[in-house]
Amino acid sequence: MEKEVAVSGNGARRNEDIALDLLKFVAASTGFGRAVAPSTGFNSTPAPKPEEQVNELLDLYSRCLHVVEGKKA
C-alpha cells in the first residue's frame, strides 16, 4: 500500500508533518515510549504511567517542531 504525503498548495510539506515524522523516527530508533518488558529479578525503575508517557511524547513533539522551524528547543 502506498503512503500518501500531505502537501500544501505549493507542494511543500507542513512543519507539523515533518516534526511528526521526526518524532516517529526518534521514538522508533531509541525505543522511546515503549513499555518495559517484565523480567525476573529486580526491576530498578517502575514502568511509567500512561499520563507520563503522553507528556513525554508531547514534549518530544514540541522539541521536534522547534528543530524543524529552526528555533532553539
Image (cartoon, rainbow, N blue to C red):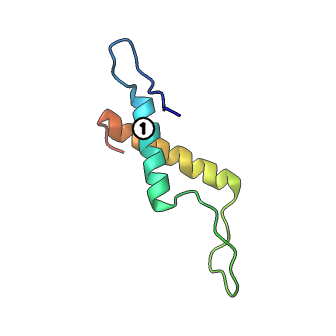
Front one among 45 and 22: 22
The residue where tag 1 is placed is 19
Q: Is residue 38 above or below residue 10?
A: below
On screen, residue 71 versus residue 35, left or right, reads: left
Front one among 46 and 2: 2
Mark 1: few/some/many CA within 10 Å (<14, 14-19, 20+)? many
Q: Where, quadrant-wise, is the C terminus in this rendering?
A: top left
Q: Is residue 39 above or below residue 55?
A: below
Query: Residue 35 appears at what percent x and percent y?
Result: 64, 63
**Residue at 62%, 80% in the rendered image:** 44
Query: Residue 71 appears at what percent x and percent y?
Result: 31, 37
Give SS at disc 1: helix
Furthest-top residue in this view = 9
Furthest-front residue in this view = 1
State which quadrant residue 65 falls in. top left
Q: Is residue 31 above or below residue 72?
A: below
Q: How many marks on residues?
A: 1
Query: Residue 42 appears at what percent x and percent y?
Result: 67, 86
Furthest-left residue in this view = 70
Mark 1 residue type? Ala
State which quadrant residue 19 falls in. top left
On screen, residue 12 versus residue 16, left or right, reads: left
**Residue at 49%, 53% in the rendered image:** 27
**Residue at 48%, 32% in the rendered image:** 3
